[in-house]
Amino acid sequence: MSSEQPTSQIEVVEQQPKPKKKKLVIIEKQDVSNSNMLELPTTQDFTLLDSEYNKSKDFKSLYERRFSTKYLMIRSFKKENLEELLTKYNIPFNKKDNLDVKKQNVFEHIEKSKIIDYLLNNKKYMDHSQIVILTNELKKICQEKCCVHNDDFNGNLNRIIRNPDTHTLKMLESQIDNLKKQLESYAKWQWYNQKCSDLNENIIKMQENIIPTLRPIAKIDFFSQIEDIVFPFDLKTTIFPKNYKKNISKEVILEFIKNEKEHFELLKWLYQEQNPRLFCNNYRYFIILIDINDINNSRNLKCETDLINKKVSKYFSQINKTNIIDIEYEYKKDKSLSGSYKTKCLYTLVYQ
């Protein structure tokens, strides 16, 4: 990921005040695909975008197609959202039509600005009391060790069963008990990661220039209006990778924090080192967590919502196009995916 542009930074509070509903001014100029927002798309446009979304792992070409952002927004709608919009704008539809037919109907007949207004009017936030309880529960997990580095439990089970050195039932039961402990640890840490991500998405959603998705969709967590363009982003809350540098001392970390060029190199590395199973060349917003005194404890910052809220809010309140980083990278971890890729991202460093 090569880059040549500015950056950002990030924090949370024991309680988050309910945000005031501010009107996001939608500038009907262009979106990522540079299509005219007032021009209505066709059935062919929908079919093409739908096929590319479902089949491609390189979203850059999808983003550059006409009406791509509009398509992605509609993809996050539930059945009731689609029917409400169609009814509101007096567009005939059959209640028995399947979801894709209703999506296509909205896509072809309702302007993007009206879809954005609908999304903004339906922003929902986590309850403050829920945030407090959840944050306290997550901090309890930080006290436990994560001992699972391979989540292929079926493979692990097969290795136990086929182990030629397992001669007795007692030996088998001992290995099964160990696998149970690993599964419990894995489940707790996966829950921790998911709930921390939920908290961070809630923080992002509270920002004035963020357009939400109404339900989870693959590879897109939110949209951000940056000047005259609406961009889709996938949120990645990432701890500073231990294997990014050979010797990571406090001094090395402090130098890294001050060096913007190194930030860009890390972003490129994060794209290059994607797991092939999860690979996607999409636009991302990275929240990069760093415990300056002990890099191994960086994961514990995931639930420090006050800290994250402070930094994220500051970042999005000042964001402009110069913050968008252009990344170019070579992917070599899987032959079927290998090649040169280009994408864009944003990031915030959260450290203490």
Image (spheres, helix red, strand yellow):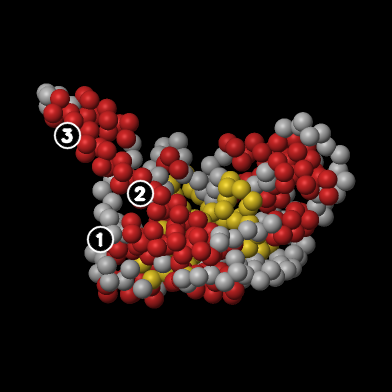
Q: Secondary structure beneath disc 1?
A: loop
Q: Residues within 10 Å of mark 2 (few under 14, many from 20)?
A: some
Left or right of residue 270, residue 252 in this image: left
- The total of numbered circles placed on residues is 3
Mark 2 secondary-structure assignment: helix
For label 3, the residue is 174
Which comes before the other along the chain, label 2 or label 1?
2
* Closer-to-camera residue (170/208): 170
Q: Find numbered disc 3 in the image and state the secondary structure of the residue it sits on.
A: helix
State the image quarter where residue 275 is shown.
Answer: top left
For marks 2 and 3 on the same chain, the one whose residue lies earlier in the sequence: 3
Say if mark 2 contacts mark 3, CB within 8 Å: no
Tell which circle, 3 or 1, labels the residue nearer the N-terminal end: 3
Dot 2 corresponds to which residue?
188
* Residue 67 placement (x, y as % from top left): 72, 49
Examine the rendering and report whether any part of residue 44 can be seen: no
Residue 72 lies, in percent from the top left, at 66, 48
- Amino acid tagged 3: Ser
Q: Which residue is mark 1?
A: 246
Instruction: Name the amino acid type tagged 1.
Output: Lys
- List x then y, in percent, for residue 117: 75, 59
Depth check, front residue: 124 or 316 = 124
Instruction: Judge whether 56 appears above or below 263 on screen.
Output: above
Identify the residue shown where x is 50% and y is 46%. Answer: 280
Which of the image's four quarters has the C terminus?
Answer: bottom left
Cα distance in 3D space between marks 3 and 1: 37 Å
Residue 181 spot, x, y in % from top left:
25, 42
Q: In the shown orientation, is residue 315 left or right of residue 268? A: right
